[in-house]
Amino acid sequence: MVAGVAFWKLPGNLRRGLSRLCKGCIDPAVLSQKTRYAIRAMQHLADHYGKGPVQLAEISQVQNIPAKFLTVILSELTRFGLVESQRGKDGGYWLAIAPVDITYGDLIRVMRGSLALVPCASRFAHEKCKNCVEEGECRTRALMLEVRDRTAEILDSIRLSDAIDPAPPFDESTQL
């Protein structure tokens, strides 16, 4: 988002200019479709936490995620220990960790590898930006380090449990 406008909705020349801020090292697709699907799948599993396995077909249908892609995503989440699965008729997927113990920062790091918008600002996957000035002289990098830290602070403070669908409100008129 730039001034409240989605990056892809900006005029072409402005998009190109922003993309060159660090001479081509900014990825405007901050959250890939795969990461967004993973978040939705995890939110769905959080809504069903403690209620037994949830079938892939249900997650796929309710969250509008292609089943084949969802299989890949859930396999990754299983490999990272966030999800468990069981095969068979009564099988499905469930959270391996309580929703209160999973932050959105954790989830995005697992799926994306980093919260940094540029490779030179990443804590865990640091790479020098291509065709850029020296890192110590790059004002964009300094800005992106601060953006990374503030983003981490926010995303690490929001837990998966914070987005669980609340139970329907209690309606006294339906009680005897």
Image (cartoon, rainbow, N blue to C red):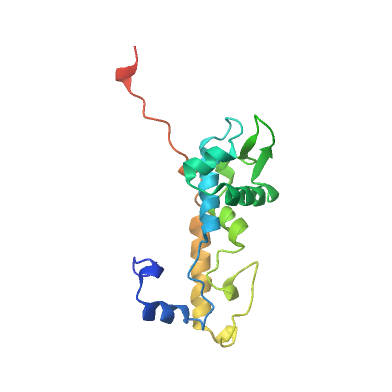
Q: Position of residue 23 (x, y in %)?
A: 51, 84
Please say whether residue 50 is visible from this viewpoint.
yes
- As drawn, which residue projects farthest toward the left? 173
Identify the residue shown where x is 48% and y is 44%: 63
Instruction: Pick whichever, 135 or 29, lies toward us.
Output: 29
Q: Position of residue 175 (x, y in %)?
A: 34, 15
> Total of numbered circles in the picture?
0
Instruction: Pick whichever, 100 or 19, lies toward us.
Output: 19
Identify the residue shown where x is 62% and y is 56%: 110
Q: In the rendered image, which quarter contains the N terminus? A: bottom left
Q: In the rendered image, which quarter contains the C terminus? A: top left
Q: Position of residue 27 (x, y in %)?
A: 51, 72
Identify the residue shown where x is 51% and y is 37%: 47
Above or below 153: residue 102: above
Please say whether residue 159 is visible from this viewpoint.
no
Q: Is residue 71 left or right of residue 30?
A: right
Above or below 95: residue 140: below
Above or below 82: residue 19: below
Give the quadrant of residue 92: top right
Above or below 47: residue 130: below
- As drawn, which residue projects farthest toward the top? 176
Q: Position of residue 60 (x, y in %)?
A: 53, 43
Instruction: Pick whichever, 49 or 92, lies toward us.
Output: 92
